[in-house]
């Protein structure tokens, strides 16, 4: 027997950490994406589209150690070191520092798409995932911070999630204390990373090794332990602990102002104020937050203020605040809470010609229905009417139109409602109206 030189391609599965989205899953993901776009329009964020592939240097510049090590990095054929984007913010910062330099402020930018990180695949953690990203650039005022929190709350609410809260902190509190003690930024970042991983003891050990004052250690210890739902009470206790750490006090006041705006503005959602909370990305300078739902121990998104990043990419010093919402995780949360959304297609019409000679009429009718906004398909398997009807049920068809020669002579068709199994003969010109009249 001759040996085949054709490779057998039948056994392939996606590369570890990558996923196929079958129709039901794709619908769930796209539903969240559509909601995120709707929200961008409501809050007046303009969409920008940036490349998935960027220079490694750009992406590595200010990502935390954690992300830097997990980038998909390679050399392209032109000898450039490139990487798949692990987040959107560096690309946005690049745009604002270059092509959008002269755009009037504030700039509200939205982007949505896939990101890549060589994370260990597990529940809610993949190597390819999607984010909806909102950045408000040019304002250092608390109204801007409050806007990102409200926007986050709105998306979660519109998705219909229950029992959720926003974990809120402020990088300026811990950094303020450490700066005043002379701890350099690199060491501060190292400590923040440990805090992000909830390794408080190791963080404290490192702080002690750096050689800060006993008062500093005590203050930090107390701050790490503080958290609560009553924002103003927690912030009051933080303030008392901070004694004369002035920049940290200013950060606490900033956080209080942001929360006051939200509360006075009437946006109500549960929050947990955690001044000892940190986020993995290095570039935050102020407010930081993450949304959660109960029963799911992973963040649905992450946001915060990053006032120095755009400058780092060669732009003017430009304050900015933003949030990245994890589309996969929001979809997963909606699934966990058994939230069903209204199907995008409410009426699905199948047109069955009873004879081959009527195929062109079937095709013509399908075109007409689609032009009138009705989703329609033509029977393309050459099935008999009874077989096609059986199959229609399986495919969740709501209406079947049967084309027969006698009816067509009278400009009529048979319309069958698949829900109540009733059928009637209707005039061709009244067909759309008849389909749309049915409540489905
Ligand atoms: P980060 O950029 O790490 O702050 O992540 C922001 C949000 O993106 C997270 O809260 C998640 O919702 C989502 N996200 C980050 N990494 C992953 C991942 N590996 N898989 C799925 N979603 C992720």
Image (cartoon, grey):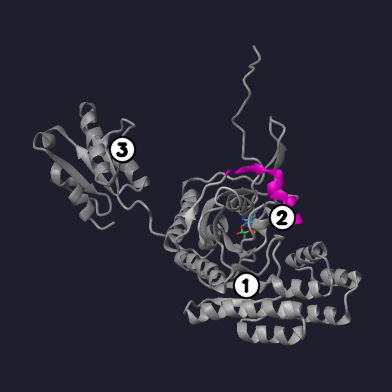
Q: Position of residue 435 (x, y in %)?
A: 22, 50
- The magenta span reads 51-68
In magenta segment, residue 240? no
Mark 3 → mark 1, Cα distance in angstroms? 55 Å
> Relative to 303, is 221 on the left or the right?
right
Q: Which residue is mark 2?
A: 62
Mark 3 → mark 2, Cα distance in angstroms? 61 Å
Q: Residues within 10 Å of mark 2 (few under 14, many from 20)?
A: some
Q: Residues within 10 Å of mark 1 (few under 14, many from 20)?
A: many
Q: Nearer the viewer, mark 2 or mark 1?
A: 2
Name which of mark 3 and mark 1 comes first in the sequence: 1
Q: Is mark 2 within 8 Å of ligand 1?
A: no
* Dots 3, 2 in contact, CB < 8 A: no
User: For numbered disc 1, what is the local secondary structure?
Assistant: strand
Mark 2 → mark 1, Cα distance in angstroms? 23 Å
Most extreme residue toward the left, as rendered? Answer: 410
Quarter assignment of residue 395: top left
Q: Residue at x 51, y 65 (%)?
A: 337
Numbered tag placed on residue 167 in the rendering? 1
Quarter assignment of residue 163: bottom right
User: For numbered disc 2, what is the local secondary structure?
Assistant: loop
Q: Which residue is mark 3?
A: 387
> Relative to 15, is 365 on the left or the right?
left
Quadrant occupied by the N terminus: top right
* Dots 2, 1 in contact, CB < 8 A: no
Q: Residues within 10 Å of mark 3 (few under 14, many from 20)?
A: few
The vertical placement of 237 against 37, above or below, is below
User: For numbered disc 3, what is the local secondary structure?
Assistant: helix
Name which of mark 2 and mark 1 comes first in the sequence: 2
């Amino acid at each position: 027997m001759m040996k085949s030189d054709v490779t057998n391609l039948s056994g392939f599965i996606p590369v570890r950490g990558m996923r196929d989205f079958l129709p039901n899953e794709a619908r769930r993901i796209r539903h969240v994406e559509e909601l995120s776009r709707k929200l961008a329009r409501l809050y007046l964020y303009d969409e920008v589209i940036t490349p998935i592939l960027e220079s490694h240097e750009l992406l590595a510049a200010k990502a935390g150690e954690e992300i830097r090590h997990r980038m998909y990095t390679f050399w392209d054929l032109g000898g450039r070191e490139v990487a798949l984007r692990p987040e959107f913010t560096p690309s946005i910062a690049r745009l604002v520092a270059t092509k959008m330099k002269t755009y009037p402020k504030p700039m509200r930018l939205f982007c949505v798409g896939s990101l890549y990180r060589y994370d260990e695949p597990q529940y809610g953690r993949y190597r390819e995932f999607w984010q909806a990203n909102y950045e408000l650039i040019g304002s250092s005022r608390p109204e801007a911070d409050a806007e990102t929190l409200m926007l986050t709350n709105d998306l979660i609410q519109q998705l219909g999630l229950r029992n959720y809260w926003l974990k809120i902190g402020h990088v300026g509190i811990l950094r303020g204390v450490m700066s005043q003690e002379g701890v350099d930024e690199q060491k501060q970042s190292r400590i923040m990373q440990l805090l992000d991983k909830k390794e408080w003891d190791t963080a404290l050990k490192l702080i002690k090794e750096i050689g800060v004052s006993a008062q500093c250690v005590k203050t930090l210890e107390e701050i790490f332990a503080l958290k609560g739902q009553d924002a103003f009470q927690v912030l009051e206790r933080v303030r008392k602990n901070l004694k004369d750490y002035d920049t940290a006090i200013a950060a606490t006041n900033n956080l209080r102002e942001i929360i006051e705006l939200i509360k006075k503005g009437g946006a109500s959602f549960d929050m947990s104020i955690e001044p000892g909370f940190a986020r993995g990305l290095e570039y935050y300078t102020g407010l930081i937050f993450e949304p959660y739902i109960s029963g799911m121990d992973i963040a649905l998104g992450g946001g915060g203020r990053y006032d120095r990043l755009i400058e780092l990419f060669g732009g003017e010093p430009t304050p900015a605040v933003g949030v990245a919402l994890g589309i996969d995780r929001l979809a997963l949360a909606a699934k966990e809470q058994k939230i069903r959304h209204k199907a995008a297609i409410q009426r699905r019409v199948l047109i069955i010609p009873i004879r081959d000679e009527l195929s062109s009429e079937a095709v013509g009718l399908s075109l007409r229905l689609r032009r009138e906004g009705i989703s329609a398909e033509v029977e393309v398997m050459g099935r008999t009417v009874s077989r096609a009807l059986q199959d229609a049920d399986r495919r969740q068809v709501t209406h079947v139109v049967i084309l027969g020669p006698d009816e067509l002579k009278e400009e009529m068709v048979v319309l069958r409602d698949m829900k109540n199994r009733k059928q009637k003969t209707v005039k061709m010109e009244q067909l759309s109206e008849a389909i749309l009249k049915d409540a489905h």
